[in-house]
Amino acid sequence: MSKVKQRTPVTDLVAEGEVVIVYQAQSQVHKIPMRGVTPRSINPRIAADVLKILNKADASLGDTISVSELDVLSRYRTASDAEVALELASAARLRTQIMDSALTVGAAAGLLEVNGSRIRQRLADHSIYGVKQGNEWRIPDWQFADNGLLPGMGEFNRHIDHEMDVVELYGFLHNPNVDLVVNGERISPLVWLQAGLDPEPVGQIAAAL
């Protein structure tokens, strides 16, 4: 990566309407595009805090930062820089784990016993959720059971915003939800779908995110 003079995080746009944070850690300059953040919507004070924390970080915190990760700063205003940096780093590590375990188009096609074109069609019609890495799709493995796509997952995927950050979607699917109760116990949306229950309630909750 070419050397870039350190700047405030709101000044650089990598695409129209997209903010990028530029920070330095361990003598290396890093650029993090901020998904869903526009120059007009960003809180300059929080942005300055993010830059301060990232500059102190011991390692790169990943290739992207989402609105949900930025919100860490507002939730932990009284926390130490180290605590907030740890939270951001944890999210970045989780993103890496998700992407490392995700399926390629070819692997998903093999699992569903279809060709790659069919998988791309399903990515386009949003019945499968995928994340673009460069020119390649990565398809999170939580969508699949041993014998194919998890029951109800295709319908669920059509409800969600496919621009949602993959870490945010992971958290939604894996954490117990107050509106999903079985035998008096809150369960996660993913467990709900794995149990073969009606995907509509999960989709409605996800659509409101």
Image (cartoon, rainbow, N blue to C red):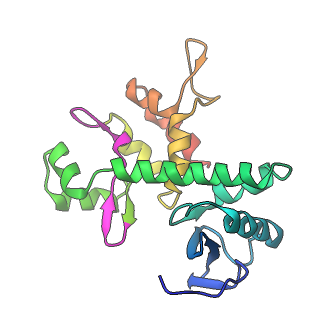
Looking at the picture, tell me which residue is in the foreground, 95 or 150: 95
Q: Is residue 160 visible?
A: no
Give the left or right position of residue 64, taking residue 148 as reference: right
The answer to whether residue 74 is magenta is no
Residue lying at 86% horizontally and 50% vertically, measured from the top left: 78
The percent position of residue 146, horizontal first and vertical second, equals 24, 32
Looking at the picture, tell me which residue is in the foreground, 137 or 56: 56
The percent position of residue 31, horizontal first and vertical second, equals 56, 75
Q: Which span is picked out in magenta?
A: 133-149
51, above or below 171, in the image: below
Count of numbered tags: 0
Residue lying at 59% horizontally and 63% vertically, measured from the top left: 65
Give the left or right position of residue 19, taking residue 96 as reference: right
Q: Is residue 83 visible?
A: yes
Residue lying at 38% horizontally and 28% vertically, measured from the top left: 194
Residue lying at 55% horizontally and 45% vertically, measured from the top left: 206
The percent position of residue 122, horizontal first and vertical second, equals 29, 56
The percent position of residue 162, horizontal first and vertical second, equals 47, 58
198, above or below 92, in the image: above
